[in-house]
Amino acid sequence: MKPKQILLFFILTSLFFSCKSDKQKIEEAKQVVETFVKDLELENFQTIKNTYPSFSKIKGRFWILYQFKITDSKIENDEVTIYGNYKQYDKTDESIMFVLKANGEGGKYIIDRTKGLSAYFGTNVYTFFKTIGCLRGLETDEEIALACKKREVVFNSLVTQAAIAQQESVIMENHSISNEDVN
């Protein structure tokens, strides 16, 4: 074989073996998510930076994903999306979504964004402001947490004002006791 043919052979072989199938990409992404979930349960925040670099940008509280199970996955363009369920307070199944992208360093997958991890997701604050149109287009925990944290004081103030108005509109009268009964 000529040197050019040998070089061409090695280039084609390396290209063939370096391309991952969709199934391999999904399996690799699932492994990253499982590692993240275990690190979250154990509060290994230093290790979490490796699997979810922007995790620290999620403002406020977040859920620990107890009894996490992957339910579905898909691959679209260069992103792998993993869907799952976890238990909140040992009674309700909550949904979560992870979107992973290949990192430039060796093509290893990292979590790019999530939805359902922030403790604000699905709360009364989130539901109220989403209903009145203040949270349109927010698709990530980072965006949801930031928007809800900014509006939480306003929401609590509205709830307090409503409670005070309700209390002031109720008049309680006792018709069962008279002055004669007291003496």
Image: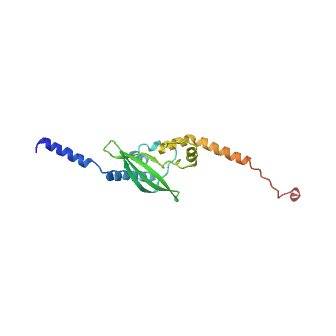
Residue 123 percent coordinates (x, y): 56, 49
Instruction: State whether residue 182 is above or below residue 51.
Output: below
Which residue of the protein is positioned furthest toward the left in this rendering?
1
Instruction: State whether residue 79 is above or below residue 180.
Output: above
Q: Residue at x 47, y 42 (%)?
A: 57
Which residue of the protein is positioned furthest toward the top in this rendering?
150
Q: How is the image coloured?
A: rainbow
Residue 180 appears in the picture as rendered: yes
Q: Residue at x 45, y 47 (%)?
A: 114
Residue 31 percent coordinates (x, y): 37, 53
Residue 59 appears in the picture as rendered: no
Q: Residue at x 16, y 42 (%)?
A: 7
Q: Quadrant of the N terminus?
A: top left
Residue 150 percent coordinates (x, y): 55, 40
Q: Is 45 or 37 nearer to us in this picture?
A: 37
Q: How many callouts does the rendering have?
A: 0
Residue 154 percent coordinates (x, y): 61, 41
Q: Quadrant of the C terminus?
A: bottom right
